[in-house]
Image: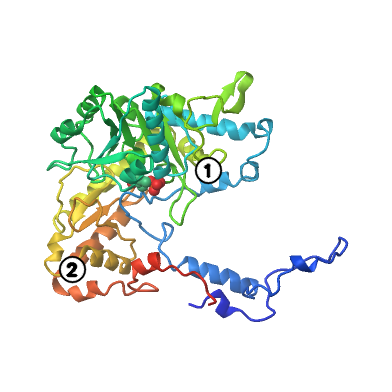
């Protein structure tokens, strides 16, 4: 495929300007550029075809199954996009006066309340704009809480199965991450937690279900251990779609949690966003939430209030990514309480179905039942010299996005599969068939896998080079 610069022909254009109907002025020379910009010159059909063709080169959820574990790449209803683009939302200016944005503030207020209802927390801020960002905001809240109590605590406990953002946020917030071991079932090793938990520990960051797709069945015991030493129990809520509408984190003993709007609540992600986050807290931590907070005054008037003297301050400009909040609001209201529950049930059923269909062909180090995702190991295929990377690349030839690979780190040759709730039985079956076929290929013709993918616009890329040696300039 040619680049737009290569398609360029001098004099072609894709615009028509009206006749000048204002006085002509001469722009002073110092404001003019010396050389004309080097822009491609193309007709409108050329431009449209170019971008449509480009859009089909990459795999996306609208073109096929995307079981990327931990990422929840589900299909998000397009009505959310339509609503977020309504001029009354999309054309608001963040510096408008509060009287003129009452509708937007009402949406934010109501959405916070929906999250309070779903999570069992007492207060919510939707200012952070990603999961990792919400982790940082939460850790700063925890820091302020202990500062206020004049307690010097320095350590955050993080299970060895945790997402990499957990230890990274911990360090950014100025704490020291300490790893908690998983036991042979893939759950928190209670003995090790007991050993590590002392008065120097700020809290435990726990992912439920964890990244192996397993529910922490000892959550009540874990909460007791953490609370007995005055620590805070934090929920990494990126996997909330596994138990949404069924149980509330607030009832399970969590003091603080984050939400991923672009995973669980109706916003597409990838391609750099925009995404959305949020932090929910129990009353004791609510004075520290970021400002401004949306408050409701008498006569249904909404305001942005900065009057929270113990707040950690701002973590983002204005009030986060408002458009993403509109999508989350539409999504939750459209599905209702019953629909939220079905999201979780279907996410779990789909994952268990795939897991049970595949466990005879791939190693399953931590046996189920699983929640919304599960982790296979490619160790059996490795005996034929085929790596998990090769299996992932070969899946592209069958029209599927690969699962997450080599994560979580505690599983050798990991393949982390999250089918999500939005896929049909037929899609799950064709994915299963592809993985079974690939298993046969691994044994009989491993070379095919090692050179895969064969059918994509480009084959194996040097992924490291793209990150380390990024060059987006066309002209040298
Ligand atoms: C995705 C994810 C995060 C990070 O969320 P982002 O929105 O990508 O920053 C944290 N923890 C877990 C378990 C996740 O899956």
Q: Is residue 313 above or below residue 468?
A: above
Q: Is residue 299 left or right of residue 257?
A: right
Marking on residue 289: none
- Specify whether tag 1 is near ligand 1 (CB below 8 Å): no
Marking on residue 321: 1
The way the protein has been coloured in the rendering is rainbow
Snapshot quadrant of residue 258: top left
* Image coords of residue 249 (percent x, y): 33, 30
Disc 2 versus disc 1: distance between alpha carbons? Answer: 43 Å
Q: Nearer the viewer, mark 2 or mark 1?
A: 1
Residue position for label 2: 386
Q: Is residue 434 left or right of residue 440?
A: right
* Image coords of residue 301 (percent x, y): 63, 24
* Image coords of residue 456 (percent x, y): 37, 72
* Residue depicted at x 38% and y 51%: 73
| SS for dot 1 | loop
Q: Is residue 26 above or below residue 333?
A: below
Answer yes or no: do the residues labelled 2 and 1 have beta carbons within 8 Å?
no
Q: Is residue 22 left or right of residue 54?
A: right
Q: How many marks?
A: 2
* Image coords of residue 165 (percent x, y): 34, 46
Asked if residue 388 shows in the view, the reply is yes
* Residue depicted at x 51% and y 24%: 309
Lower position in the chain sequence, tag 2 or tag 1:
1
| SS for dot 2 | loop
Q: Nearer the viewer, residue 287 or 352?
A: 287
Q: Is residue 412 left or right of residue 109?
A: left
Snapshot quadrant of residue 124: top left
Q: Nearer the viewer, residue 68 or 174?
A: 174
């Amino acid at each position: 495929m040619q680049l737009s610069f290569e398609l360029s022909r001098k004099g072609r254009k894709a615009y028509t300007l009206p006749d000048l109907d204002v006085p002509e002025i001469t722009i002073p020379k110092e404001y003019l550029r010396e050389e004309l910009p080097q822009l491609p010159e193309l007709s409108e059909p050329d431009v449209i075809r170019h971008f449509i063709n480009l859009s089909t080169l990459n795999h996306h959820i609208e073109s096929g199954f995307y079981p990327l574990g931990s990422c929840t790449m589900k299909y998000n209803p397009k009505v959310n996009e339509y609503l977020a683009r309504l001029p009354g939302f999309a054309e608001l200016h963040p510096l408008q006066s509060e009287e003129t944005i009452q509708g937007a503030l009402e949406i934010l207020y109501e959405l916070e309340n929906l999250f309070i209802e779903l999570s069992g927390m007492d207060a919510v801020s939707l200012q952070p704009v990603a999961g990792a960002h919400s982790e940082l905001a939460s850790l700063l809240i925890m820091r302020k809480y202990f500062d206020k109590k004049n307690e010097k605590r320095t350590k955050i406990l993080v299970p060895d199965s945790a997402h990499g953002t957990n230890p990274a946020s911990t360090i950014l917030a100025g704490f020291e991450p300490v790893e908690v071991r998983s036991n042979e079932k893939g759950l928190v090793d209670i003995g090790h937690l007991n050993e590590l938990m002392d008065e120097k520990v700020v809290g435990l960051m726990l992912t439920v279900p964890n990244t192996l797709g397993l529910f922490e069945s000892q959550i009540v015991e874990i909460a007791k251990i953490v609370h007995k030493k005055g620590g805070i129990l934090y929920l990494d809520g990126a996997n909330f779609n596994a138990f949404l509408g069924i149980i509330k984190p607030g009832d399970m003993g969590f003091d603080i949690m984050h939400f991923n709007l672009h995973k669980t609540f109706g916003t597409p992600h990838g391609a750099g966003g925009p995404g959305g986050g949020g932090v929910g807290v129990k009353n004791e931590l609510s004075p520290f939430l970021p400002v401004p907070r949306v408050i409701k005054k008498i006569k249904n008037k909404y305001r942005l209030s900065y009057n929270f003297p113990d707040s950690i301050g701002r973590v983002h400009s204005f009030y986060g990514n408002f458009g993403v909040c509109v999508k989350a609001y539409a999504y939750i209201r459209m599905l209702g309480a019953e629909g939220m529950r079905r999201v979780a049930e279907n996410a779990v059923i789909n994952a268990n179905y795939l897991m049970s269909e595949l466990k005879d062909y791939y190693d399953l180090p931590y046996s189920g039942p699983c929640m919304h995702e599960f982790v296979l190991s490619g160790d059996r295929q490795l005996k034929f010299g085929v790596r998990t990377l090769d299996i992932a690349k070969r899946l592209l030839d069958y029209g599927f996005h690969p699962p997450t690979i080599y994560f979580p780190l505690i599983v050798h040759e990991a393949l982390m599969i999250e089918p999500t709730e939005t896929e049909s039985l037929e899609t799950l079956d064709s994915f299963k068939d592809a993985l079974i076929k690939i298993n046969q290929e691994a044994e009989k013709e491993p070379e095919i896998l090692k050179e895969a993918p064969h059918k994509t616009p480009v084959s194996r890329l040097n992924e490291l080079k793209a990150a380390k040696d990024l060059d987006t300039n066309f002209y040298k």
